[in-house]
């Protein structure tokens, strides 16, 4: 059974940095695309970034482009989201998700949540002075 566990959330001042980790426990996890999503209070969950199975392709939402970096270490079954220059509007619960589909790309700019089969429980990120 696939399990995803996020860690690394917390409270940070504006302009600061955090690194989220997503530990993926699954047989052959390296074949899965992993995405990061976030949900702020009173708002819908939105896509932040995704990375393909071998890390060859990454996609970022416009709101985080040039500030966030996604990467993965398949040897450690972990996907990371490095978040720099954090803003108060980045405050949200961050979720990682994994999906696999041999017929269509999972990692796309549309961040179709239905493409992701497995989800973590979320990690809270709060950006405040």
Image (cartoon, helix red, strand yellow):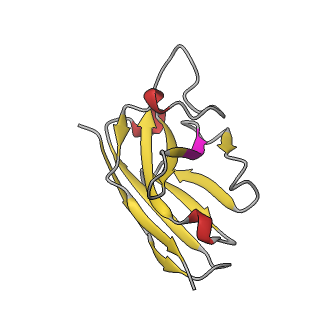
Residue 100 to residue 93: above or below: above
Of all residues shown, which one is farthest toward the front? Answer: 42
Left or right of 69, for residue 34: left
Residue drawn at x 37%, y 31% as measured from the top left:
117
Image coordinates of residue 10 in percent, x first then y, are: 44, 75
Q: Is residue 64 left or right of residue 42?
A: right
Of 39 and 101, which appears nearest the observer?
39
Q: Is residue 94 above or below residue 8?
A: above
Provide the residue span drawn in magenta. Answer: 47-51
* Side (left or right) of 23 relative to 83: left
Residue 116 in the image, given as x and y percentages of width and height: 43, 32
* Quarter of the image where the N terminus is located: top left
The residue lying furthest to the bottom in this view is: 129
Q: Residue furthest right?
A: 66
Apparent side of residue 26 relative to residue 22 in the rendered image (left or right): left
Asked if residue 80 lies in the magenta stretch, the reply is no
Identify which residue, 65 or 77, lies in the foreground: 65
Q: Position of residue 109 (x, y in %)?
A: 66, 34
Q: Where is residue 43 shown, x and y percent of the image?
A: 49, 50
Q: Residue at x 48, y 21 (%)?
A: 101
The quarter in which the C terminus is drawn is: bottom right
Residue drawn at x 49%, y 41% is: 34
């Amino acid at each position: 059974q696939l399990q995803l566990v996020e860690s690394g959330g917390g409270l940070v001042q504006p302009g600061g940095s955090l690194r989220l980790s997503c530990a993926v426990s699954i047989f052959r996890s390296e074949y899965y695309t992993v995405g990061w999503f976030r949900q702020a209070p009173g708002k819908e969950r939105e896509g932040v970034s995704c990375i393909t199975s071998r890390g060859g392709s990454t996609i970022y939402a416009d709101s985080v482009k040039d500030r966030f970096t996604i990467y993965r270490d398949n040897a450690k079954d972990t996907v990371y989201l490095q978040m720099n220059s954090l803003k108060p509007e980045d405050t949200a619960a961050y979720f990682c998700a994994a999906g696999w589909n041999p017929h269509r790309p999972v990692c796309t700019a549309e961040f179709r949540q239905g493409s992701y089969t497995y989800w973590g429980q979320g990690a809270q990120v709060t950006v405040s002075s």
